[in-house]
Image (cartoon, rainbow, N blue to C red):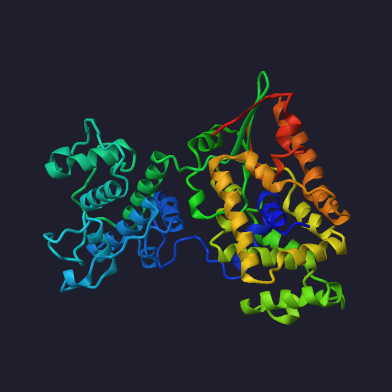
Amino acid sequence: MKKDRKIIALLLSVVMVFSLHIAAFAQEQLVPVGDKEPSAWAVEGVEWSEIYDLAAKHMFQNFNSKVTKDELYSVCVSLYEAIAEQTIIPSDKSLFSNTDSEAILKAHSVGLFKEEEKFDPQREITRLDMVTYTYDTIKAAQPAFNYDADIKLTFNDVASIPGSSLEAVKYVVSKGILKGRNEYTLDLESGCSRQELLVFVKNAYEFVRYEAGKDSKGAFWKVSDEDSCVYLLGSIHIADSSMYPLAKAILDAYHEADYLVVEANVANEQEVALYMMDKAFYKDDTTLYKNVPKEVYDRFVETIEPYGVRPEMYNKFKPWYAALLVQNLLFAENSLSGEIGIDMVLLQKALGEKEILEIEGAKFQVDLFDSFTTELQVEFLASSLYSDKETQKESVDIVNEMISCWKAGDTAKLEKLLASEENESEVDKEFNEKLFTSRNNNMAEKVKGYLSDAENKTYLVVVGAGHMVGETGIVAQLDGQYEIVQIK
């Protein structure tokens, strides 16, 4: 079985396995840390600013603490490097006799800190400082943008804005980066808290991504008949921060939809994990060592032991579970996380907002892997292991290529990456039949059912992109029966 295709199959076809194991084996939780949580209005913005890596770790605690000038420089430098997609080379330390702060040296290098500026790194900043320094950061990183903002500010405290800062304020208000304290007041003279800055730079980052056309288009279609509509979003089940923000068309479809439909609702991860553990471990005196060739076993041990997993545990793994674990560890090492997989993000967003439907369920997916023949399980594990760093790098490159295709909405190339090889073995055929063909048929029938909804409700169906493309994919099965438009 082709190794790279199997990796892509996991990314594009099964959701739940990527939301459970990375956290159990050293994946950091993508939630704010510290002795205080952010205010309710700031939670989502703070979480995304951490995902986008826009601030140092210490900023994600004590959220009502006031931000210092040095901290503002550090955040602006992180924002610059993120939106310019390049690392700043710091200015020479000899230019400053009273600091060796890398944030200040980098800020000076790109013109955010000027030599004539009063050097006061521990001064608490104002909300106006937050606005002007962030605005200068965007201009420095994206000089080709149009910075005209011909709007009339209607806030009651506009008169308090210095003339030198008015252009910056108008721009961030006109672009939706700054919302104000309320509809009447900007309150730019007051101190700036950590959570305010984190939410603000998150807004700035996303604005730049949209303005530069770098939002992710995804594998996204609208399927319609005379009175019904279903949106189809082919997901990638693990992601990195570069895959966000999602295209506004995808977010609009989410808001329009009455139902969010996923492969498996894994919101209750503990229940799913317990079921998986029950299926994933041998219960008698059978062991992994007894069920796989010694060469495969030895390579697995060499891969897993550096993570501190004990022999008495890993030797009870069934081969399919060992294979999934190895793949998860590879993804984690390359900054890919199931916690921010496309379907997981939308699922978390929908909790308490929309009714969530599932096509298969997590238990079905666990049972699917557990139903693999021993031969397929062994082949699955063998193809998940790497004999050298070069082979591993080639597989990672393929994953990155697939992610780039998804971000660009290039479904034709995604389909080529997943294409079956000629003269497949019986093991390959079992893999394709169980992981794709039979599930594609079931998913296509489900979509047809949604389109025949007597109440004409709108559905957003989010399943692995591997189920959308190809001759047996959902889109091909619906083509000719419904109007289908790919949205980019």
> As displayed, is residue 305 above or below residue 372?
below
Residue in the foreground of this view, choosing between 163 and 124:
163
The residue that appears at 65% across and 53% down in the rendered structure is: 11
Q: Decide if residue 329 is in sight here.
A: no
The quarter holding residue 408 reads top right
Q: Residue furthest bottom?
A: 311
Q: Decide if residue 77 is in sight here.
A: yes
The quarter holding residue 151 reads top left
The quarter holding residue 250 reads top right
> As displayed, is residue 98 above or below residue 446?
below
Residue 360, percent from left and from top: 75, 46
The residue that appears at 73% across and 36% down in the rendered structure is: 474
Q: Residue furthest top?
A: 226
Residue in the foreground of this view, choosing between 70 and 2:
2
Pick the quarter of the image with the N terminus: bottom right
For this view, does 16 lie left or right of residue 334?
right
Pick the quarter of the image with the C terminus: top right
Residue 175, percent from left and from top: 33, 38
For this view, does 451 lie left or right of residue 161?
right
Residue in the foreground of this view, choosing between 341 and 124:
341
> As displayed, is residue 148 above or below residue 80?
above
Say how many tags the image has: 0
Residue in the foreground of this view, choosing between 415 and 80:
415
Residue 313, percent from left and from top: 73, 77
> As displayed, is residue 11 above or below residue 449?
below
Residue 34, percent from left and from top: 41, 67
For this view, does 147 lie left or right of residue 488?
left
